Amino acid sequence: MDLAETPSREMIAHLAFVDHGRDSLQLASDGPLAGLDFAVKDLIDVAGYRSGWGNPDRLRDTPPAIATAPAVLVPLMAGARMAGKTATDELACGMFGMNPHFGIPINPAAPDRVPGGSSSGSASAVAAGLADFALGSDTGGSIRVPASFCGLYGLRTTHGRVSVAGVMPMAPSFDTIGWLTRDIAMMKRVSACYFGTIEPAAAPRLMIARDAFDIPEHGIGAALLPIAKGLGVSTEITLYEEGVQFWLETFRPLQLHDLYATLGAFAAEPGRRLSQAVAERFALAATVKAEAVAAAMPRREALTDRLLALLGDDGIIILPTVHDLPPLRDAPVSAQIAFREKTLALTAVASLTRLPQLAIPATTFEGCPIGLSLIGGPRSEKRLIAFAETMGDLTRKAGV
């Protein structure tokens, strides 16, 4: 698709929303979200709509859902109108929004670059103003990455806090539900419907993960670090005491084994149509050895225990959201794999420890949005949002 010119609203909508989920739905006319439109990632069930999971065979074979996922019922019963279902990377196996079967949603903030995935259509729709907020899922960064790429706020919730019933399981010990918004006021408004009223909170104990700022490339970490230091009185910590590779070698076998145990049979069905990147992902998942999974489980718990001790009841860890600018829309599969491995060093932290993370737009770098993230203790979403509200719009302060 030629994006030499600014993409039209119609073009963005065409790629952000799936054709089989363009009908709107409203169940209540009043409530705290009345008057708002939202979008739903197409691996979350809505009664009467098909969930295609970004795969043509699933879309062809699946009947409409018979029940609506509880995560969707919350905004519907709060008065919001579902504007439609949105595109996703195939089987949520992607970090970029590149789906060869159905196309690549447009990143309104950087149209020549990908929007991020796997909650790609959700991010595109919100960034373009086609929805006030959008629901997505996050396993290894599927909300946080598109939030950074598109200049949005994105919340990964505490694992297990928001029901994943009616949501395609990808890697169940990591899967969470979350949402994307254009500003912190909307993030607060939506989140209150899930967690209760969000009141101002006492100033948190801020910790800058200094070694995490050495991971981003091309000077991005150096651009973000002064912004992080400007958020308030803070201390610097070493996040990766065990080394970055220790974190990645703990994450990989657990996430891949989860994926294969959950969706391996679907992927292995004779004649199944899978994109190259997804087929390679399942081939890799099939090679994970039992002893690697068994060894990673106690390592995961040790990492979690250390972070819980660091965070206590009032701590927030600050780190970059991703390691680089969004790849170009025509980036090859090999570039996708290399990018994923490096950004996982940042996103795997909250995923492994099952903690909430709020991605916030911080500034732009070479014309692209880049974000910071806040990680808190279990069920600390309200504290993260309350603190982010006190920060104001960082991009405005940066003169973006």
Image (spheres, rainbow, N blue to C red):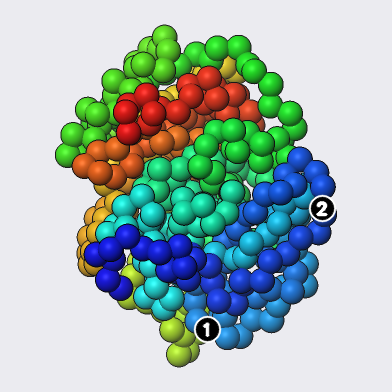
Local secondary structure at mark 1? helix
Front-lying residue, 117 or 180: 180
- Give percent across and percent down for residue 230: 36, 16
Front-lying residue, 284 or 77: 77
Q: Are marks 2 and 1 in contact (CB under 8 Å)?
A: no
- Give percent across and percent down for residue 242: 33, 31
- Give percent across and percent down for residue 168: 60, 64
Q: Is residue 70 visible?
A: no
The image quadrant where one finds the N terminus is: bottom left
The residue carrying pointer 2 sits among few (fewer than 14), some (14 to 19) or many (20 or more) residues within 10 Å by Cα, namely some
The residue carrying pointer 1 sits among few (fewer than 14), some (14 to 19) or many (20 or more) residues within 10 Å by Cα, namely some
Residue at the spot 64% in from the left edge and 81% down from the top edge: 62
Q: Is residue 196 left or right of residue 271?
A: right
Front-lying residue, 299 or 138: 138
Q: Amino acid at mark 2?
A: Ser
Q: Is residue 277 left or right of residue 34?
A: left
N-terminal label among 2 and 1: 2
Distance, label 2 to label 1, CA atoms, is 36 Å
Give the residue at the far bottom of this rendering. Answer: 271
Residue at the spot 54% in from the left edge and 72% down from the top edge: 18
Q: Is residue 145 left or right of residue 339?
A: right
Residue at the spot 37% in from the left edge and 75% down from the top edge: 100
Quadrant of residue 244 within the rendered picture: top left
The image quadrant where one finds the C terminus is: top left
Q: Is residue 238 left or right of residue 91?
A: left
Give the mark toward the camera: 2 or 1.
Answer: 2
Residue annotated with mark 2: 29
Residue annotated with mark 1: 57
Q: Does 357 sit above or below residue 276?
A: above
